[in-house]
Amino acid sequence: MRAVKLYGPAVALAMLPVASSLAIRKLSADNESISDVAVDMANPMYATKASFDPAETQLNHIPESEIPFDFKSVGSEDQDCLTVPAYRQDSTFTVGPESIAFGEHPKIVERNGKYVPVCVTIVSDSIVLGPVSTVSGDHPRLVQRDGLPTRTANSDEVQNGPKILKTVPLSEGEGPTHLSTIYYDTASKTRNEVKPSATSIKKFAGPNPMIAKAEITGGSTIKIGDYDFNALFETPQAKAENAEPTVQATVNGNGHAEANAANGNKRVSTRAVGGAAATTSSTSAPSTSYYATVYGGATAKANSSSQTYASSYPNGQANVSSSTYASVYGSNGVSNSSESTYASVYDSASNTVSANGNEVSDPPNPSGLDGSDLTEYITFSSAESSFSANRTVILDSKPTCNTVGNLFSGISSRDPSAFFKEDSLPLNLPRGVMKDSSIHTNKFYNNLILGEQTNMVWTYPYGFYWDKSSKHGFAVQYSSPSSRINGKKNSNGAVSSFTYPTHKGDLVFSASELRQNQSYLTVKDMEAMSVAVQLSPEGYNKTNNIEFPLVEGMGFATAIYHGNMTLRLSSEFTITSLVQENVTARSTEMQKYRINLSSGAQWIIFLSGKLSGFQLSMYNGNIVASRPADGLVVQAAVAPKERRLDAYYQLSAGSYVTGADVKGSIACRDVQYSISYTTAGSSHANVPIIFALPHHLENLSQSTAKRYTGINLWSTTKGEMRGLLTNVLSFTDTVDINVQFYPYLSGTGTSLSYSPEQIKQIRDVAVAELEDIDVVATILSMESTYYIGKVLDKYAYMLLVLKDIVQDHKLADSLLVQLQSYFAVFASNEMPTEFMYDTKFGGITPTANNGGDTSEDFGTGYYNNHHAYYGYYLHAAAVVGYVDNQNNGDWVGKNKNWINTLVRDVANPSTADSFFPQFRYFDWFHGHSYGRGLFESANGKDEQSSSEDYNFSYGMKLWGKVIGDKAMEARGDLMLKIQSRSINSYILLSDDNRVEPADYIPNKVAGIYSDNEIEYNTYFGSNVSYIHGIHMLPITPASSSVRSAKFVEEEWTQILSKANTDSSGWNGIMALNQAIYDGKTSYDFFASKNFKRTNLDRGQSRTWALAFAGGVSRF
């Protein structure tokens, strides 16, 4: 019988992924050699002694061939850990180029699949302890354990050192106090122990590192130095009564644990894991060692006079008495046992199993508090589990048919500071940036609020910039295909990039009153698709200024002159002619001019306002007005090739757009939505000209399509645009509601079928992937918000497979508890990097960048790619909620509000939500998100992972489904459909693409896609697998909605099948992507006996790969 350890209590090394052959025993109180001691990092109240068997574990004898390149340092035979050279760089400890360090301080490294403890040399006066740390400098007053500061002995109590520093708990029975410090006195060469005084913290780490309030013998104050943690203990509670020190109560999760004992009872222990209640009680003197454990929303009761163990898994009840062991696995099961029995229930029905007599299988030893063995073992054998692989599994997704009148109703108005502390990103904005509401961080105009504010922004089809030092105005330029600059050619003959010149203003709007040091920029009214810019000679001036509304798709470059501002137009080129032309309107209300430039460009200008006696003329190479004109509207556009088309511009001249909003409704699959433009001014038509992008044209409503003027202009990176005389772009579309939790290929059915052989292999792989893994610790060991999300979601997909496809409810529910435990860590803000609500920009961000290092955590604190990162968290939450709902749990209700803040941070749909900007990332005009955050960029905003873009929409859709938010679910469906159209127009380039330049199409993907440039590359390397893979991962049921089978086959045949790939995680991503058009080949890759786990990305499991490829392989 093979035991797979999924979860363990605090007294074992369950939080560390150590080798399974590592022997652990309790540290005795006598003076043992310090080198024999390894600290249990999971629970600082216990220490363990490690004993290694070199022949079995190979911890001390690693063959030269297995030592990674440039990592040659190994421990000698008398060391219990490997010596690893470490150096400090920007407060980061670096451990060897080929090591994976788990945790905030390298405690364990992975070598060729083996987990090895490390000794680390650190130069610091404040450290996070590894198993053994050599310290130089002053004795550290505080050490960090699981993210919390813990006091050691005061430095003045330590003599001559320490040179070797170990922290171990006080002896059992002395209560929860500070950690003592054991050190060697280098002068006397003796072992010493300093025990600090005063009651301090009891840290119940366990599988879920949360804090529990302990009231022991009258109730002690929980403090560490000046750190008062009592405020954290509002929900989880633990109570221990009785003077006996061995009475213990522990909470892991939002549960209640209570232990009551009297008359000398020993080892009365209660533990509640994940929204549960566990109670133990006894009143008679003979009571010894009874233990109750709860997993999930269940109850376990142990009532006994001797050695009783009760364990209840999700939503079951276990009642035991008299030297018994009872377990419930599944939902609503009941297990009752008595008279030295072992009884179990393994199903999801309300079944009752009562057993009398001895069972063949012995239960785990629950003896408990002496540390001998409290690890729960979940064993997999036909004798113990109801699971059977000898069956065919048939599944059918259940699409949701929603009818929603307003797709953009608000999610919530809850103050996010209820869940995350308030703080402010230390980024100073230029003085002219006005915070009318939450400031957008990922919009086309962000260059105008960052740095010198002089980089370009693009509204499509035009680009704009502030000419701050030369012409002292606001410039507009148009980039035609003839100005495109190509990069070098790739091996397949395709150009590697293309871009356009910047800061080549065709026209610069200015005024005679603006000059050097008298030109001030104000940025205000920052909205999802628009912004307003003002130039004035004396800072922000409400009277004398030039106003520039910038709105996506606007057909005119518009400037409104207010007060005493005299129009001046200039150009980066030579203005060769200025010709006034007749208009049908009275000349006192409108004037029209044609301007020719030395570049060959030709522009038309319309002036609207009170124009009596007003005239433009040439002066010193510039165009100047004869006088100021308060309220003057100046509008410029590239002249159409056919002059007859000028009439459409004249019809709209005088009207200009100031903003845009999105509206929509859905009836099951049929959706209607629109981008409605707000206008000002007046014109003959009283509507503006709006330019539509190529992906818009695919589903424009007939009424909107009829507004086409015949005017076309080119965008920089989105092909040719069409001019429409309209104030609304209305669309009709059909969404694919068949995209659900299960594997799915677009255009196929929703039913899945798995053979017994497939079920067995998927389950065997899942068991192997979970073996000896502490899921919570593994997730938290990742070094960034991004990787934590990827690994979290990896296990969420495994949970889904185990629950619904493999249907091993026992294993699934155990994994569910661990994922719920992780979310409890996030909810309590005990992540490796604390999160905050940023009051400056209105967002939920990690605090990693608050020290000023913008590169830390991939710039997440500066709003880089929240949509790409948080999409993993949302999908994982959706799966956890989905499974918990099956178990009749209440996890969703308890966690909905704080998880919704992540949705609101990325995709708040309503301007009524004042805490977050509307749609921070997703751009409804462009049809995709922009990932670059608060960083200047010469080429504007960019998208570097289209697949992680739509992965957020997918995760949001499922989360909406789980919480019953129909608008959110339907909005996710609509975003997926729009992303499919946009991404296939501009980023995934099939052979029949007619949008992007023909000499770039053979690359098949855009690589880094930005407003002014497309480059066949990534920010982290130029390998072909990187460039293509970053637009694939993760492969999900939503992938084929965007990545069509036709495109995937073209990409594979033309590029990927010929590319040189190393043995890395990108292989697994590309192989699973192949399942979209060739499921059998993909499945065979992952099912192979020779499969190497190095082919898996850290966010990908072989379990999900087999389930996905196996599920779609029949189509």
Image: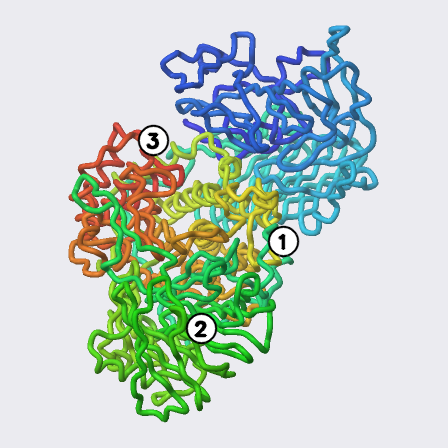
Viewer-nearest of discs 2 and 3: 2
Residue named by callout 3: 1093
For mark 3, give the secondary structure: helix
Residue 769 percent coordinates (x, y):
39, 34
597 horizontally vs 356: left or right: left
- Mark sitting earlier along the chain (1/3): 1
Disc 3 crowd, CA 10 A, few/some/many (<14, 14-19, 20+): some
For mark 2, give the secondary structure: strand
Q: Amino acid at mark 2?
A: Arg
Viewer-nearest of discs 1 and 3: 1
Residue 515 percent coordinates (x, y):
53, 65
The quadrant where residue 650 appears:
bottom left
> What residue sits 43% from the left and 52% below the top?
937
Disc 2 crowd, CA 10 A, few/some/many (<14, 14-19, 20+): many
Residue named by callout 2: 568
Q: Is residue 489 above or below residue 956?
A: above
Closer-to-camera residue (673/775): 673
Q: CA distance from mark 1 to mark 2?
A: 41 Å
Can residue 781 be seen here? The reply is: yes
- Mark sitting earlier along the chain (2/3): 2
Closer-to-camera residue (618/222): 618
Residue 364 percent coordinates (x, y):
54, 30
- Mark sitting earlier along the chain (1/2): 1
Q: Amino acid at mark 3?
A: Arg
Closer-to-camera residue (344/508): 508
Residue named by callout 1: 424
Q: Is residue 300 above or below residue 940?
A: above
Image quarter in which the N terminus is found: top left
> What residue sits 22% from the left and 53% below the top?
989
